Every structure is written in structure tokens, then in C-alpha cells.
Image (cartoon, grey):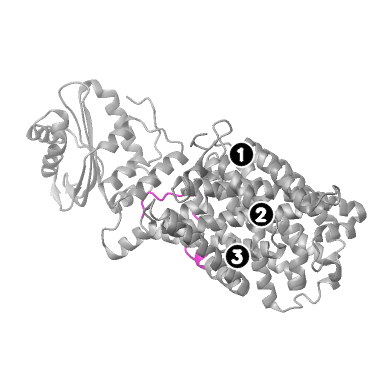
Amino acid sequence: MTQASLRKGLGSLHVFAIASGAMISSGLFILPGMAHEMAGPGVIWSYLLAGILATAGALSIAELTTAMPKAGGDYFFITRGFGPGVGTVAGLLSWFSLSLKSAFAIVGMATFAAMIVQLHGLVLGALLLAAFVGLNLIGVREAARAQVVLVAGLFGLLALYIVIGMAQVRSELLIPFAPHGPTAIFTTTGFVFVSYGGLLNVASIAEEVRKPGRTIPLGLILSLVAVTVCYTLVVVVTSGVVESQTLDGSLTPISEGGKVILGQFGYVAMSIGAILAFVSTANAGIMSASRYLLALSRDRLLPMPLSAVNRRFQTPHTAVGVTAAVIFFSLFLKLDILVEAASTVLILANVLSCLSVIVLRESGLQNYRPAFKAPIYPWLQIGGLLGLGFVLFEMGIEAYFISAGLIFLGFLTFWFYGRRRVSHESALLHLVERLTARELVTGSLESELKQIVHERDEVALDRFDRLVEQAPVLDVKEHISAASFFAAAARELADHLGLEASTMAEMLRRREEQGSTLLGPSLAVPHIIVPGEARFDLLLARAKKGIRFSDEAPEVKAVFVLAGSRDERNFHLRALAAIAQIVQEKDFEGRWMSATSPQGLRDIALLSQRGRNGAMQ
């Protein structure tokens, strides 16, 4: 056993299958009967509204996950947004919700499997759980491959159900559309929101995704659209072909619909589809939920053994085992309690994701660099917050008690265990600093975000990057002449290069007289040859009010000073090429001028998308 990195083995198809398989399960094959009893045919709107509301959370999760593709999903970015206290609560809530959703799937699977195998439901559920645990211990890629096959078969069966069933829909079964009033539709929307919990599954396994900046948004958005359309059409068919007295409260609603459409063959086919769906959800749920414990343990908010990764399979075996234990004990809960608790927690997780986007964007963190940005910010997040809040309000008093109880347990965990062990810097603190102009942060979050971007983009730091990390930085507050700037730069660099400061200042001045080093009206790259061997250094400078290099360039804002010996000529040329790529990036000047610290100026160069050469000498 060792704590090690997780293997990156998932592509777009895997992400799509994990999200879709986690959503199309009990939410479709069991819930429609219970939901129809609550809202009548209006349950069609409940599923569609839940999908629309999930869009705000999904796009926010996509942005946050591409900025921070780490195990633990929404826990990880909520912690970085609001601090370890809120993060601990959110992480445990999401872990518990996904565990309950997996338990819900296993209960459903045992219900259908009992028609074939004569075993007690609890015994059968335990055996199925053991099989999924074994699959997840072998490896995430193996579990994901199984997921792709399951989801392909599932979509095929549902397409058959929709195409044949639409022609048999009876309009009289859809009237009255809302027999219990419009309020029941909104209450039911919250009840079925658990059906869209697969979105969190994707966030939690982000660290194991290849090229997450592109793969995660693509797989997640395609999955949400496909599943929302599929849910809505399947519920339309089911409500339109099955009599209300049969459908209301049924635990096999889609199988009943298949029986009406295609007779006994349809009943068996949809029951097989249900089993496939439950298998895919339970598999994805264990895979995803266990990553929350891993992430909490890595941050020392839970005991360290939970972050152990198996050396052979590169899977978090301890976290998988603990998650499986919680799922097993959840099998003893009543079905409606499982659903309501899971839905409530998922709504809260989506609320916090929307809030995290707002806090991180408004915090001014320059190293918050999502590869995908949620559109129509901040209206999408505000709309999501209002809609999700309304649905949560309509769910009633039981949902409040469940929410309060789970939040309280999460807070106790942080207060008595994690509080004394860790202190994360948060984007909320950066936002407060920005609003109050007080020094409240140390830069540790910026440093962590920089490291995450390098890992996400698989950047291998080269010699120029290492030079930037050590480079002195001048942040010039007043408008000065080029000669004054050269004198200041020489004082910073001369000792490193074995020169007198006055000698080096004169060399910089002469070089500028021989030929301008301006690359633009606000950018200059003075570069000189110094005596000696194996000498090379770099200085970064920002002048908010400008440096007067000439009449044509009276306000140069960004300066890169290069100084090296003749034997470093090749690297000198490579460094010039690297700087040229850095300054050509979109909004370079805006980011340069808004950086809040010397390290912030270095990070602009370190996070550039320039071509790198690991062997750059």
C-alpha cells in the first residue's frame, strides 16, 4: 500500500457513459411510478424541469472541474472556494448522497433480480455490492469499459421503447395533466432530482480523465442533454400507455409500460434494461463516491489511511471499502427516505457549485483558469440558485430535517477532527481582501491552482520555467526613464552575474542605443552579452505608470531583461522565443497589469501555453 497518483485512463466516451449510466437507473426504472402518484401526468414536467435546473449546476461543475480536475469533484473546488469547513460538509454530503444513490440502485436491482434468483433481497443486494467492489478495486478503466457496454445496451432498449411506445400513447391517460395542482409538480421536481446525480460522478473522477479541459465538458453536456430528452420521452410514453391505477406507486413502471406496448417480451426486455441501469449506477456510484473520501483524506480532513492507493491497481481500495460498507447499511433504509435524502443533498451540492463559480470568478484569482467557462455568467448561476432554492423549499419539512442533520454531522466532523489539522486558503478570503483592501492571503491557493493547471495540461517545466521561478521582479510604481530603470535592474542582477551594478547599467544603456529592444509600444526585452561562461539570468518588470524608452514608446509597461554569456547563445535565442510566445497570449497586458504580487507576474509566464522543450539547455 502507498499513497500514489491515480491512473489517467478515461476518455470522452467513458465520461459520457459514467454520467449517463449513473443517471439512467432507479430515477427512470423505479421513480416514475412513485412520482406519478405524487403529480399525475404532470410528472413529465417534473423530469424536464429537474433536467433544466440541473443544467445550471452541470455547466458550473464543468467549469470548476476543468479548472481543478482533482479527485473529490465538488468537494475539492468548494473547499478552495469557501474553505475547509464548508468543504468538509459538502464533501461528506456528496459522498453520502452518491452512496445512497448506489444503495437505491442495488435495491432496485435486487427487486428485479429476485424474479429470476430466489434469494432474500438483502442477501442478493450484498452479493451484487461485493461484485461491484471487486470491479472497482481492479481499476477505474476496467470499471469504465464495463460502463460503456452497459450504457450502450441501455440506450438501445430505451430507444426501442420510445419509438414503438409513442404510437400507442392514449391522450385520455394524460388528462387531467396536474390532478394534484401545480405545486405537486414542483415538489415532485425536487423528489426526482436524484435522477441527475450522475453529474457529480463525473466531477469526482476528474483526476483520472485524459485531457480533462476538453473531455469533461463534452462528455458531461452531451450526457445531460441525452438523458434529459430520454427521461422526458420515456415518462411521456409510460404515462400515456399505463393506466393510473397500475402506474401509481409501482416499483416497475417501465416494465409495466413495456408489457402494454410489446406484451410479455416488452416486460422482460424493460426488466433487463432496468437491471443494466442499476448495474451501471451502482458501479459508477461506488467509483465516484470513494473519491470523495480519498480527497478529504489527502487534505487531512479525514484519517490518512483513506487516501491509500493500491500499488498494483492504482485504485483507492480503503475508500472503496468504507463506501461499500455505508452502502450496505443503507440497504436497510426505506426506499422513499433513500430518494428524498439523496435528492436533497444533490440539490445542495448544485447550489454550492453555482456559488463557487461566482466566488472564484469575483475573487480576482489570476491562476483560476478553467479550460471551459459556463456561459451567460452570472445569470446562469443566479437562475440556478433561485430555481434550486425554490424546489428545495417545495420539498417540505422532511427535506429540511434531512439537510440540517447531514450538515450538522459534517460540521461536527470538521470541528472535532479536521479543524486542528488543516487551514486551506480560500477564494472567499481573496474576495474579502479585494473588497476590503486588507492583506488577508498568503498566495498558497494561487500556488496550488498553478500546480493543478500544469498537471491538467501535462506541462513539463523546462529550463526557462525554472529561470522564471527564481527571477527577481521589479514592480515600478512611478513613471521613470529608461536609464533609471536600467540602473534599478542592474542592482538586482549584477551580483548574480559577477558584475558591478554600474557596469551592467551602462551595458544595458549602450545596447538600447545600438538598436531598440522594443517589441511593441508597451513591451521591451533588453538583452545583453556578459563576460564569463555558463552565466544566464532574467528579470521581470512591471511599470504601472510606464517607463520612457523613447519618444515613440513613452509608457512601456512590461519588461523582460535577459543577460547571458556567449556560450549561452542558443538558450538566449530560445528564451527570446519563449518570451515572444508569452506576450502574444490573449489579454497578456491586462493580466500583467492586474497581477497582485511578484509571484503573480511570474505565474503569468509559468502558465503560458507556449511550446516547451524539456531538454531546453
| Distance from the alpha carbon under mark 2 to that under mark 1 | 24 Å
Q: Earlier in the sequence, mark 3 or mark 2?
A: 2
Q: Which residues are magenta?
A: 365-382
Amino acid beneath label 3: Thr
x and y percentages locating residue 166 in the rendered image: 83, 60
Query: Does 372 lie within the magenta span?
Result: yes
Q: Are marks 2 and 1 in contact (CB under 8 Å)?
A: no
x and y percentages locating residue 78 in the rendered image: 47, 56
Element under label 1? helix
| Distance from the alpha carbon under mark 3 to that under mark 1 | 28 Å
Amino acid beneath label 2: Phe
Q: Earlier in the sequence, mark 3 or mark 1?
A: 1
Q: Which of the 4 image quadrants contains residue 517?
A: top left
Front position in the image: 59 or 25:
25
The numbered dot on residue 344 is 3
x and y percentages locating residue 17 in the rendered image: 66, 46
Element under label 2? helix
Magenta: main secondary structure? loop
Residue 412: in sight, yes or no? yes
The numbered dot on residue 329 is 2
Front position in the image: 362 or 191:
191
Q: Residues within 10 Å of mark 3 (few under 14, many from 20)?
A: many
Question: Which residue is painted at 36% across and 51% down in the image?
Answer: 366
In the picture, measured across the screen, residue 514 lies left or right of residue 118, that is: left
The numbered dot on residue 140 is 1
x and y percentages locating residue 144 in the rendered image: 65, 40
| Distance from the alpha carbon under mark 3 to that under mark 2 | 20 Å
